[in-house]
Image (cartoon, rainbow, N blue to C red):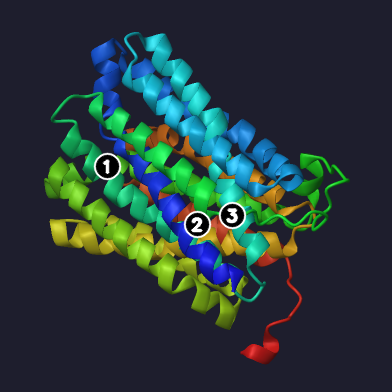
Amino acid sequence: METKKALPILFLVMFLVMVGFGIIIPVLPFYAEEIGANPTELGLLMAVYSLMQLIFAPIWGQVSDRIGRKPVMMLGIAGLAISFFIQAVSTQLWMLFAARILGGILSSANMPTAMAYVADITTEENRGKGMGIIGAATGLGFVFGPAIGGIFSKISLNMPFYLASGSSLITLFLVLILLKESKQTGSETIHKKPSFWKALNGHTSILFFVQFLISLSLSGLEATFAYFAAKRAGLDSIQLGYIFMIMGFGSALVQGGLVGRLTKKYGESTVIQGGMIVSAVGFGLILLVHSFSTAAIFLTIFGLGNGVIRPSVSSLLTKTSTTGHGRATGLLSSFDSLGRIIGPPLGGWLFSLTIGLPYISGVIITFVALVLFLIFRPQVNPVKVKNL
């Protein structure tokens, strides 16, 4: 009963968080350039945010295991509001860097804490559905956020940052008023402090590496597809925006509507395997892009497969981990960030060798992840067999 009330609230919160984050995506490169950033400095500005998330996500996850999810989530959202505001008033490059570092440190609390919250309030049977709802909120936020940012950047380049800051403040008040604490005192192993390396050496470690490989291949695609589609099909930035919007909607629909049903019926392991196979097929099909429609269809096929992987991995991890929901999901977010740090420069380098190479490597990386998962996947007690 509590879950039915909490999940829609959590969906709204994570949607608004990601809308705020997405608002600045199309504007930041031009804004940084106006302040005086060269391409190298712009790359560092983007990378430093992911680096801070890589370092701090497991720490915030662990803190949420100790003191509760709600205060940590509020801190993360407040961090976004402050970071966006500093970026809005920045007049020098060091101010942008300081804001991005602060934002990366604090906002890294949001995703692992939200996933841990879902794990707290759902039964194992419905865990996949809850994680899928978080994934859908994230995906939809990334669909609407950049569109809003692009529209309001016509007023001024710093207007989207003010909007993002205001959106984060509204979200903060919603969490304060509507979201109840999910962490039950004494419900996990709070008195023990197993090291992060212990979590990596455990039977769930394959899930972290699978997430890293999937994130690595995805971010390589995101970094190069605009250039690929322009060369192969002559697509412009507006058409690309529509294509990514279609893919985002498809992925969000699958995460919000299908992941729960699929994991309930077949189990997370099977859904993860299916998602990786569809993703690999999508990567291969991208090589055949020759028009707007083929780009939209093939990228959406990839997005549908990729969309079910993260929530299913998160669900399986929280079922099998023994180190606390927050610590486990925080570490997962770190591996996701690591993939997003390495993926774009690797994808760009592969693209410079041959334009189809990022997608060929995507097929290979995804199948490597699939084979590793088949060999080392963690087992869950068959508690759902009677419900199938």
Q: Earlier in the sequence, mark 1 or mark 2?
A: 2
Query: Marks 3 and 2, Cα distance to the nearest angstrom?
Result: 10 Å
Evaluate if marks 1 and 2 touch, with contact meaning CB atoms under 8 Å apart. no
Q: Toward the viewer: 224 or 124? A: 124
Query: Marks 3 and 1, Cα distance to the nearest angstrom?
Result: 24 Å
x, y (%) of residue 320? 74, 63
Q: Is residue 138 visible?
A: no
Q: From the image, which quarter does the N terminus lie in?
A: bottom right
Q: Which of marks 3 and 2 is nearer the N terminus?
A: 2
Q: In which quarter of the image is residue 156?
A: top left
> Dot 2 lies on which element?
helix
Residue type indicated by callout 1 = Pro
Report the residue at 23% width, 42% height from top: 148
Residue type indicated by callout 3 = Met
Callout 2: 10 Å neighbours few (<14), some, many (20+)?
many
The relative height of residue 323 versus residue 303 in the rendered view (above or below) is: above
